[in-house]
Amino acid sequence: MDKKIIALLVFITAYLLFVFLPRKRTQVAVISAGMLILAGIISFKDAFVSINWNVMGIFVGTLVVADIFMQSRVPAYIAEIIVDKARNTAWAILLICFLTGFISAFVENVATVLIVAPIALSLAKKLKINPMKMMIAIAVSSNLQGTATLIGDPPSMLLGGFAKMNFMDFFFYKGRPSIFFAVELGAVSSFFVLYYIFRRHKEKTALIPVEKVKSWVPTIILVALIVLLALSSFFDTGFSYMAGQLCMIAAVISIIWEKFVNKSSIVKGIKSLDWETTFFLMGVFILVGSITATGWIEAISLSLSGLVGENIFLGYTLIVFISVILSAFIDNVPFLAAMLPVAISMSVKLGINPSLFLFGLLIGASLGGNITPIGASANIVACGILKKEGYEVSFKDFMKIGIPFTLAAVSAAYLFVWFVWSK
């Protein structure tokens, strides 16, 4: 059988299994990548090169820093202060969502949900209200703001690695407002959706402070890492190595600090990291590398370019909203990884700035996951926490918040990117 056909069959099979066997996605990605290498579809050297090691360094490094930051209890302590200062329950919930979004811009989404969840649950218990809507709002807020910066979420890291964007490029890119401002405009729009949902909670909230900060050192490490990532933009202009190295150095410092100050086990800490997602990302890089090497990305881009003709607005709209719909049900990481080279190729064929399609793709793929409880890892974690508390979240329950929130956020960001980047 032709190598090109084998690569496509393995790719399609793997992606279908990602949908139907989400708990086995890492095994599927690794086995599929191994099959492609063993079958000679992609050489071991090419497979190794197809993995973006800078992105992998950012992902693993920030996981370590985020984990120790979470254990310091600083985010939970700040959340309690916010709730105590809010004039009523509705604003307390909205401010918790705001805090969630702020943390998520710099810390992985799942870690963010785990940081904020105890505050939300304690607030709900004190007021004797159902925490379901609050937890869903926290999850979708985390997913939204995770898109705003280079280190907020794996899809942003993928885009940064693919387009060679550094930390500051997410704020201003080639002299124009970038992804950060598109996401913030989406956040402002979606804020009104959340306000409408929680507007009836007018009672005053007073939480008894229970959180005590264990140490401010992890916060200092995280802030220093963010500053260094911003400064690295001036030295590693091609986004090829420095960001990943900085994140790994910060991770090593964090592990050493945790070992000698809190007497924690280094081996146990390393084992507790999200290695499943790490190996999943590596497998997906190789899968996408195989279909790129066999010419399928070029074929898909030719097909889509033929469909939209010279109508750039149609092409942009299709990329954004097809991404939204598909990402509601499938993992946005493999989808984005497969579509990034397609977006670039289409841009070249249409003779336009590739940033338009790339930014539209990131917005659609990242925010579309907010529609359903299975669309993003943070959603799954939030629903799991609620289940432990005795609350079962149905698709209907989640989508009552997820759909209007997503439509508001995507529409605003979609229009912003079009008006800024279409010329």
Image (cartoon, helix red, strand yellow):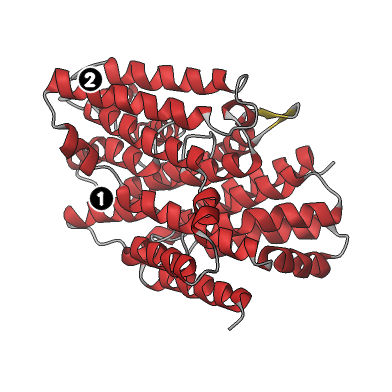
Residue positioned 39% across, 62% down in the render:
30
Label 1 environment density (alpha carbons within 10 Å; few <14, some 14–19, many ≥20)? few
- Depth check: give the residue in front, 407 or 176: 176
The mark nearer the N terminus, 1 or 2, is: 1
Which quadrant of the structure image shows residue 393? Answer: bottom left
Q: Where is residue 144 in the image (x, y as percent from the top left)?
A: 50, 43
Q: Mark 2 points at which residue?
A: 257
Q: Where is residue 352 in the image (x, y as percent from the top left)?
A: 83, 48
Q: Is residue 269 above or below residue 250?
A: below
Residue positioned 43% across, 68% down in the render:
32
Quarter the C terminus occupies: top right
Q: In this view, does 362 lie above or below 243?
A: below
Q: Is mark 1 on a helix, strand or loop?
A: loop
User: Do residues under tags 1 and 2 come within 8 Å of each other at their CB atoms?
Assistant: no
Q: In this view, does 11 lie above or below 311?
A: below
* Residue 207 numbered tag: none
Q: Position of residue 118 (x, y in %)?
A: 22, 38
Residue positioned 76% across, 70% down in the render:
303
Which quadrant of the structure image shows residue 231? Answer: top right
Q: Which amino acid does label 1 sit on?
A: Asn
Which quadrant of the structure image shows residue 17? Answer: bottom left
